[in-house]
Amino acid sequence: MTLSSFRRSLCAVALLACLTGSAISAEQPQRGGTLNVVLNYEPPALIALTTVATPALSVSAKVTEGLLSYDFNLKPEPQLATSWEISPDGTRYTFHLRPDVKWQDGKDFTSADVAYSIELLKKVHPRGSSTFANVTQVETPDPLTAIIVLSRPAPYLIKAFAAAESPIIPRHIYEGTDALTNPHNNAPIGTGPYIFEKWVRGSYILYKRNPNYWDHSRPYLDQLVVKFIPDPAARSVAFETGEADLGYRTPVALNDVARLKTLPQLAFETKGNSYSFNVTTLQFNLDDPHFKDLRVRQAVAHAINRNVILQVAYFGLGKVTASPIAPGIKEYSDPAPSPYDFNIQAANDLLDQAGYKKGPDGTRFSVMLDYNPIAEDMFKTAEYVRSALSKLGIKVTLRSQDLSTFVRRIYTDRDFSFTVNGHSNLFDPTVGVQRIYWSKNFRKGVPFSNASDYHNPEVDRLLEAAQTENDPQKRVEEFRQFQQIVEKELPDISLISPQFITIYNRRVHDHSVTADGIEGNLSGVWVDKK
């Protein structure tokens, strides 16, 4: 549906009336104090410009902001833009920018920064080539107006301007440099509520309050400390002892959630995750000598029982899915079951047909399985896959590595056979899903792109049609056909859409007030004084 006008302003009273529970507090915010946020893993960079790894998304928006923010229903709200309009034909997005905003080095924020950022995101962001595919230029008629011009409509685009998804960066810092290696990726300068202070590798990141933030009443905190605790048991202890105040995406071992819920100082929240639904997949390298054969991939699909994975790896916290589009994106996700039911006999027959007969020891072939180390559930899923495939005579060895090594292995070196991975669907399949299956997004060195090297002209056609389709029903049908093809051809096997839980100490208030929750800027968070 084409929208002609999106002028909006915040209304705090209405927001408080709509939201209840722990996400929004009716108490008067207190100033000062420190918030300790825990991450499972250390970020590869501190801006979500060239990476969409979850730890980077967790910290990016504290310093760099977006044009818009979004409520729980993905309704856009002002951030660096105070108002906006979309032309009737959907090809011109006019943003009126907030005046008197300064970069943290004292330079003025202007429309030139917006234009430069959008053009750079299109080039280097893992999702940028699909998100901004139709963008032809960004006009800057004055310092406080930016007009994004499209060759064709992009029905999803108005939802793409969140800070962690499309960060606006300082042109004067990045212009003339290699954005992939610019040192400010790890020492960011932004317009946001917090100023980067230091990064103690392997330990924590320290942010201080920005005294010149454009929202003069915020942030309430004096400082924000982001701690990296890779061990899930240690994260649980951190919450128990008060070392950790806040963590998201279920920051502890799933089998420990029930126990932690008995602790009176802790509370649990599921709001703040509607901007980004995830799907855990078993992703194949289609250039691998074993998995380039569809029959082998079909055999693996027949050997997988998603309901078992949901229980043993996710402790029931999620939904099984055969679709690459998460069930949370209800208008597009196809709820149909996999065309490959759980059938061990069919799996064995397919492997025989593919020429992989069992040897004297019962082994057909051996293969290495990598898994994304970002969460314990992916390791447990990998353990299940190893066990399930052993019943077919496929000997699987798990390979453990840190996040940076994993990303380089999968997306740059392509030195893998198959991998348990997680893909964020985000707010729309064009942005979150297309990048994984679109042949034009097979780009070595770009994290979370088409790592399978999957090429299908009909899939490309459907994805590209959905990019510009303004008829909602036609768009639903295009995505339905896409899902059916991918589920049959198996460049990967979609398994589970996890349910994410935010854990917080009850002294923390107003932490999950937008669709992106903890990935937002946390400018309104405040803490009771200890």
Image (cartoon, rainbow, N blue to C red):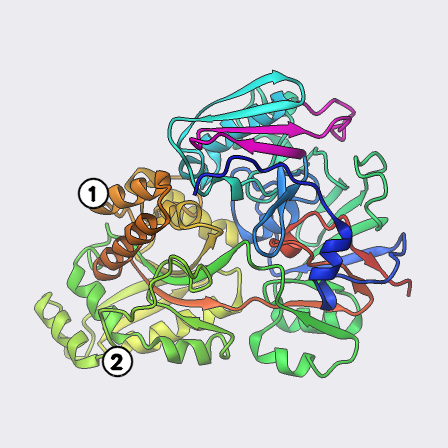
Query: Label 2: few (<14), some or many (≥20) within 10 Å?
Result: some
Q: Quadrant of the N terminus?
A: top left
What residue would you read off at disc 1?
Answer: 457
Image point (28%, 46%), residue name: 453
- Residue 422 locus on image (x, y percent): 44, 59
- Name the quadrant containing residue 97: top right
Image point (65%, 27%), residue name: 170
What residue would you read off at disc 2?
Answer: 391
Query: Label 1: few (<14), some or many (≥20) within 10 Å?
Result: few
Q: For the residue labelled by badge 2, is the local secondary structure a helix, a strand or a loop?
A: loop
Q: Quadrant of the C terminus?
A: bottom right
| 70 relative to 151 in the view: left or right | right
Residue range (magenta): 81-110
Nearer to us: label 2 or label 1 = 1
Q: 419 or 29: which is nearer to us? A: 29
- Residue 387 locus on image (x, y percent): 34, 78
| Magenta residue check for 105 | yes
Predominant SS of the magenta segment: loop
Residue 448 higher or lower than 113, as above or below: below
- Name the quadrant containing residue 267: bottom right
